[in-house]
Amino acid sequence: MAMPFDEFGRPFIILREQEQKTRLRGLDAQKPNIAAGKAVARILRTSLGPKGMDKVLQSPDGEVTITNDGATILEQMDVDNKIAKLMVELSRSQDYEIGDGTTGVVVMAGALLEHAHKLLERGIHPIRIAEGYEMASRVAVDHLECISHKFEFSATNVESLIHTCMTTLSSKIVNRCKRSLAEIAVKAVLAVADLERKDVNLDLIKVEGKVGGKLEDTELIYGIVVDKDMSHPQMPKHIEDAKIAILTCPFEPPKPKTKHKVDIDTVEKFQTLRQQEQKYFDDMVQKCKDVGATLVICQWGFDDEANHLLMHRDLPAVRWVGGVELELIAIATGGRIVPRFQELTPEKLGKAGLVREKAFGTTKDQMIYIEHCANSRAVTIFIRGGNKMMIEETKRSLHDALCVARNLIRNNSIVYGGGSAEISCSIAVDAAADKYPGVEQYAIRAFADALDAVPMALAENSGLQPIETLSAVKSQQIKENNSGCGIDCNDVGTNDMREQNVFETLIGKQQQILLSTQVVKMILKIDDVISPSEF
């Protein structure tokens, strides 16, 4: 780092250990930052669209993930560069807010940085570029509002919701089953949605997976699936009209909190202690029977004696059920979680039409299905697949589809996909640039060019001639004044995304443009990087 000197040529210290620190200023600071952002965007660029490629990521402990979900790729890449970390945050915030479009938002930010780099080379001040980008993003967001379409849906007419979810799933590894998975996602969201308040609580949708079977066997269960089996192999496996006691207290004698020691010096004393213990178990099981419970679900384990008693008293039980699952079971069955046996009353029991244990394949794996519940606002999507990686990727894909369905219930505006919205915004932003007399118009035009990066990447990933395809679609949009013309990635034979039923949510697209612009502005405003030098 450069040493400051006084008028007599003596060095003086401003920063602690300044001779060991490196410092980059002005353009020298901005160019590496832009290069880092572009490098991250380049990694994700090939994963965009229905023909996008997948990435294999290996964690330090050897676990392998195969995915083309932008947020997951960046999350697991273990990025070290500070600016690249901003891109990871950008993808994560898109994932949290919208759930879909995590790859597109990074590709968009990378394109904006690339064009900003060219403007910096020409000597335009970074603040003027940032202001121009801000103006252009406002124009683009307003234009998206103009070209968006509202569509009506109801609990019976969900076709448009399914088409939008299919668009999301078409870029995933599960696209051969996109219709059935989209239907499952829409049904699950509608089952837990509050259509009056336009609100959806995705916590009520449990996504469970089991290796085996094939992807087509994935099903939606109006109830809860628990990856446990009955505590005793001779307990009934099929219970109709079950009354469920949901317990967080263990089936065992109470243990005093203090340190204690019991001296037993005769057989009679031991017999008395054993009878007392047995009485405890007896009372516990009797309490459950007295309130009318026909199934006990317990958060803790119980020993063989309690298990034996439960079996003899015809009271089936499930043990070691996790806290989150207990809450979902309580919501679904309308029961209350009971912390002490003394508080067990008939009103606190949950009700389910059918509880059954189902075995899978030859592996003796069992799961318990709790169906036909009193309150069907908790549902489970049960995924099957050939291997663990496939199931994990299907879970991530379904998460995106569920988020899209939720966004449409909140705001039912859509724009057309296939890059058509970006091309239309690019044309609108380019036209708006003439209204701004200052240097900002260069940045606004650069923003318009950057918007073309998404359709260009789509064409490139689909094996089409990118520049030729993009210019043909752009001229078609201008000639026909049709904002629905996009890149024909699936080679259907038409560029009109309305005919192809390729939809995307309006709020998802707007969020992409706003988030990528904010991050690029932040990167452009950095003009000094002080970092400890590496030895």
Image (cartoon, helix red, strand yellow):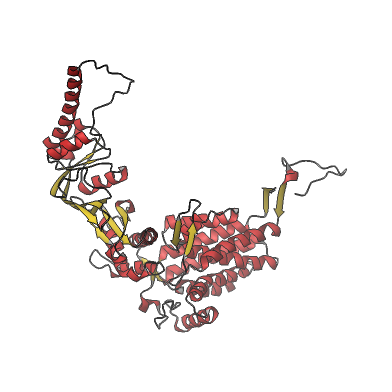
- 297 relative position to 527: left or right: left
Residue drawn at x 34%, y 20% is 259
Q: How many marks?
A: 0
Q: Furthest residue to the right?
A: 8
Residue 263 percent location from the top left of the image: 27, 16
Residue drawn at x 19%, y 46% is 233
Whether residue 189 is situated above or below residue 436 in the rendered picture? above
Of residues 468 and 169, the one drawn nearer to the viewer in this rendering:
169
User: Can residue 522 be seen in the rendering of this structure?
Assistant: yes
Residue 444 occupies which quadrant of the picture? bottom right
- 467 relative position to 493: left or right: right
Residue 222 percent location from the top left of the image: 22, 56
Whether residue 422 is situated above or below residue 268 in the rendered picture? below
Whether residue 506 is situated above or below residue 368 in the rendered picture? below
Residue 408 occupies which quadrant of the picture? bottom left
Residue drawn at x 61%, y 69% is 441
- 172 relative position to 450: left or right: left
